[in-house]
């Protein structure tokens, strides 16, 4: 019971903290929190809440028999990072390197042109 | 004949925490996470492509989203309490907490549906821009999962009432609780990456 209550209260605090940071940012006249700082802060809060909920709600890492849960979750998380960060990186690269001018120039230098 | 069937099922007692069934369900949840990762990646790539139309700062209501998030978070908490009651064999408390979870979950879904209706009615439906297509797909898929979870919860409540807290029912409830907690996990990131980052960055 206590585990769930602690997890719940921590999650509420982390959620409201992220909300408050954003509220401060959008309602202030001058830039009180810079964009990169805000981004890092809310992402850190999100990952912290993820870990809190994993431990207190999903009982990952608690007790002798649940090593497999941690292992499976970490391996999945690696895939998730690969997919998300990989997609962002690749699409960003394409976006930067493939303006219409560059595309037609590239096609023209290929055999046969277009 | 009914007695023989249930007797055979319960002859294999299932340890909810570490049985094969729970293991298999965890694997499924991880594959579901990977699907959400693909939807997140799509949203990340397309969120700036508003086709000249309104972007997240214009469309999202910060206070409404906070309220939605706290409702879902509370439902995850009541779900945990329901499982505690189930572990103690307390049938009425289990049903009570699951009903609370169901009510909160329905509330969350209603708020989300209201937001979707508002967006579509004001011309910002999924066809309006790539950003909106990605948004509706990601958040809509999460909403679909919630709907399935609510249906599952309703059926489970009926089962608890009719069969009581047998090991078989308990095993199902464990999986339902896992599913529900997992949906709240995904929502943390939707809340942060879609709504908070959309409004602030």
Image: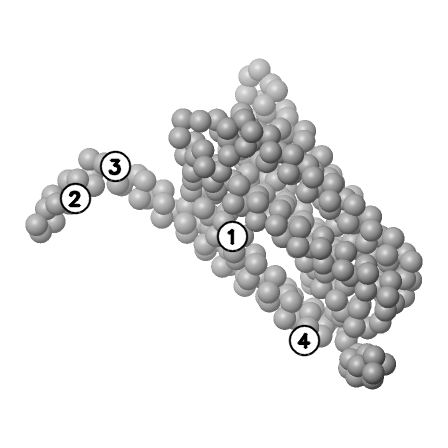
Q: Secondary structure at mark 1?
A: helix
Instruction: Find residue A62 and report its horizontal and vertical position in percent.
Output: 73, 63
Residue farthest to the front, as pictured = B1
Q: Horizontally, is A104 left or right of A2 in the view? A: left
Check contact, mark 2 vs mark 1: CB within 8 A: no
Q: Chain of mark 1?
A: B
Pointer 1 residue: B37
Q: Chain of mark 4?
A: B
**Residue A105 can be seen, yes or no:** yes
CA gap, disc 2 and disc 3:
10 Å
Pointer 4 residue: B20
Instruction: Find residue A9 and report its horizontal and vertical position in percent.
Output: 78, 43
CA gap, disc 3 and disc 1:
27 Å
Pointer 2 residue: A106
CA gap, disc 2 and disc 4:
55 Å
The residue sitting at 48% across, 26% down in the picture is B54
CA gap, disc 2 and disc 1:
33 Å
Q: Horizontally, is B55 left or right of B186 in the view? A: left
Check contact, mark 3 vs mark 4: CB within 8 A: no
Label 1 CA crowd tier, 10 Å (few <14, some 14–19, many 20+): many
- In the rendered structure, find residue A99 and report the number of the disc placed on it: 3
Where B160 falls versus A92 (above or below)? below
The residue sitting at 65% across, 67% down in the picture is B25
Co-location on one chain, circles 3 and 4: no
CA gap, disc 3 and disc 4:
52 Å
């Amino acid at each position: 019971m206590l585990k769930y209550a602690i997890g719940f209260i921590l999650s509420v605090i982390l959620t409201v903290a992220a909300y408050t940071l954003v509220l401060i940012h959008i309602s202030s006249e001058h830039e009180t929190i810079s964009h990169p700082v805000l981004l890092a802060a809310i992402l850190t809060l999100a990952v912290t809440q993820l870990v809190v909920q994993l431990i207190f709600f999903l009982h990952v890492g608690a007790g002798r028999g649940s090593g497999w849960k941690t292992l499976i979750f970490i391996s999945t998380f690696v895939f998730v990072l690969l997919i998300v960060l990989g997609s962002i990186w690749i699409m960003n690269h394409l976006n930067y390197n493939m303006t219409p001018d560059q595309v037609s120039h590239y096609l023209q230098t290929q055999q046969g042109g277009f | 004949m009914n007695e023989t069937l249930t007797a055979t099922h319960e002859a294999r007692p299932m340890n909810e925490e570490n049985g094969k069934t729970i293991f298999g369900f965890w694997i499924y949840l991880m594959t579901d996470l990977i699907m959400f990762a693909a939807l997140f990646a799509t949203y990340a790539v397309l969120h700036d492509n508003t086709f000249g139309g309104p972007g997240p700062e214009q469309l999202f209501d910060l206070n409404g989203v906070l309220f939605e998030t706290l409702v879902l978070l509370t439902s995850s908490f009541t779900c945990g309490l329901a499982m505690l009651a189930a572990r103690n064999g307390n049938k009425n408390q289990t049903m009570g907490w699951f009903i609370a979870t169901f009510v909160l979950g329905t509330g969350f879904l209603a708020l989300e549906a209201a937001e979707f209706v508002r967006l579509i009615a004001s011309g910002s439906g999924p066809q309006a821009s790539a950003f909106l297509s990605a948004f509706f797909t990601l958040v809509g898929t999460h909403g679909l999962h919630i709907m399935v979870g609510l249906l599952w919860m309703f059926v489970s409540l009926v089962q608890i009432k009719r069969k009581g807290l047998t090991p078989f029912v308990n095993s199902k409830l464990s999986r339902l609780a896992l599913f529900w907690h997992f949906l709240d996990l995904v929502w943390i990131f939707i809340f942060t990456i879609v709504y908070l980052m959309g409004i602030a960055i």
